Image (cartoon, coloured by chain):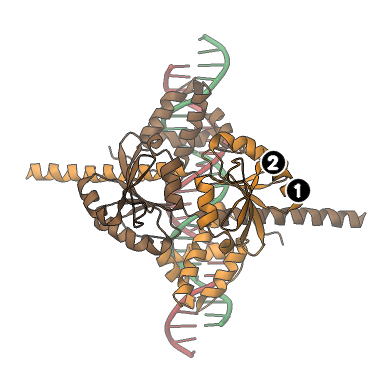
Chain colours: A brown, B orange, C green, D red
Amino acid sequence: MKKIKVSNNVIRRMPRYLRKLEELEAQGIARVSSSELGNLLGLTPSQIRQDFSCFGEFGQQGYGYNVSALKEEIAKILGTDRGYSAVLIGVGNIGRALMDNFCFSAWGCNLLCAFDVNKDIIGGQINGIPIKSMDELPAFLAENKVDLAVLAVPKEFALSVTDALTENGIEAIWNFTNVDIAEPDSPLIVENLHFSDSLLALSYYISEKKDEDAARAARMERQKAVK
Amino acid sequence: MKKIKVSNNVIRRMPRYLRKLEELEAQGIARVSSSELGNLLGLTPSQIRQDFSCFGEFGQQGYGYNVSALKEEIAKILGTDRGYSAVLIGVGNIGRALMDNFCFSAWGCNLLCAFDVNKDIIGGQINGIPIKSMDELPAFLAENKVDLAVLAVPKEFALSVTDALTENGIEAIWNFTNVDIAEPDSPLIVENLHFSDSLLALSYYISEKKDEDAARAARMERQKAVK
DNA sequence: TAGATTGTTAATCGATTAACAATC
DNA sequence: TAGATTGTTAATCGATTAACAATC
């Protein structure tokens, strides 16, 4: 009965499958095999079948997978049909970018309200989403079922706002601040989008490539010298 | 001589070490052991020592690591001292958020210029960074050493802009569009920040927790019934 | 039916953890 | 010196890949 714990690596690949399947569906492609999908994503067919088998049997021998059906299954696995609702804290640049451009509803998430301390924007709305004062946050969280908070405040306030959120029953945070907001063994669910971590990883890969290119060039130079 | 290829997992942890070390340094802490660092980050001491040993010997037996020195070493490993420069394509909400708030220079990266198609903002600047027309992009890339491009355009333009960038010599892209911009075996270095993938992973973890909580509640209910 | 492709079991590979000699 | 902690080698664990019977 109890589903075996699915590994992190698998979970991180699921949204990629979902996006690719949506793409295929938009192209009018009805079926896909694990090896086709593997080619598109740079994964082995085995891995793809293993990943799916964590959650059930979605394919058909000799045929492969129905694109639309598989897409639906994966969306469901990821919880997009559960009607989660969210609040956003911090209507700065990033907060505004999310409110304006990020389609929460496309991923099954309902952004109810945003909160800020800036009097100039409190009472207004962006893209139909009202902006309330931080003072109203506890009452709002008490009155509404809110499954997650989007944290987009300046990093100085990250920890205090996190405390305020958890004290008012928030159990999951989508963290856009460049700060770790939870202790290693905290029960709070935190999904970090650390821009700097991402840029630094990119910086490493660039460095690695430049080093390789330089080494290759040096090797060729030496060869030429020998001749 | 040739450094053995460092695994992805290790590279993804390096920025986390860097951030934590900066934090410790700011707190005036001079030394840290692998087990202390492990406690702070939720990693084993072994793993930390293994990770560092991919790049050299930065500690001292009986003492641990000097926080500042280790921080510097890791920053260097990640390439922050290489003076990389960047351009940003797409001055929408996200682009603006990055220009306004993201401190590229703190991570050793120099944001030279932004590009957009919107005549209203071309010629202006944000946070000291000039905004030029997309038409000027090829000339700019020809005249300046640019190591990476930040891609923050609407997703419809992601692929065509990527083509334009690679045709003009760009080898690395920091991708904020919700689209895969490179084939699996492309030589282009792409670092993705797929917001939706992140939100979906969070959605999964929330679902998993709710399911666990529900299962626990059901178990307790059954127990109560037995009594 | 024959061909294709799944789901799953077994084999391999790689990453994490444990152990320990070296040494500050 | 004794205690602490590293860097590294060996052991374990988990994830990926390969293989194949089942079956559409």
Residue B184 in the image: x percent, y percent? 61, 38
Q: Which label is found at residue A166?
A: none
Residue B218 in the image: x percent, y percent? 18, 42
Q: Is residue A53 visible?
A: yes
Q: Chain of mark 2?
A: B
Camera-near label (2 vs 1) is 2
Determine the secondary structure under disc 1.
helix
In the image, is residue A215 above or below residue A114?
Answer: below
Quick check: B216 left or right of A124? Answer: left
Give, as a three-letter code, the residue at label 2.
Asp
Q: Quadrant of the C terminus of chain B?
A: top left
Quick check: A73 left or right of B171? Answer: left
Q: Is residue A197 visible?
A: no
Q: Which residue is mark 1?
A: B142
- Tell me which residue sits at (50%, 79%) in the image: B63
Q: Which label is found at residue B135?
A: 2
Location of residue B107 by image quarter: bottom right
Q: Are marks 2 and 1 on the same chain?
A: yes
Residue B58 in the image: x percent, y percent? 58, 72
- Tell me which residue sits at (23%, 45%) in the image: A144
Q: Sequence-wise, which precedes: disc 2 or disc 1?
A: 2
Q: Nearer the viewer, residue A35 or A182?
A: A182
Q: Nearer the viewer, residue B13 or B55?
A: B13
Q: How many neighbours does mark 1 have within 10 angstroms: few (below 14), some (14-19), or many (20 or more)?
A: few
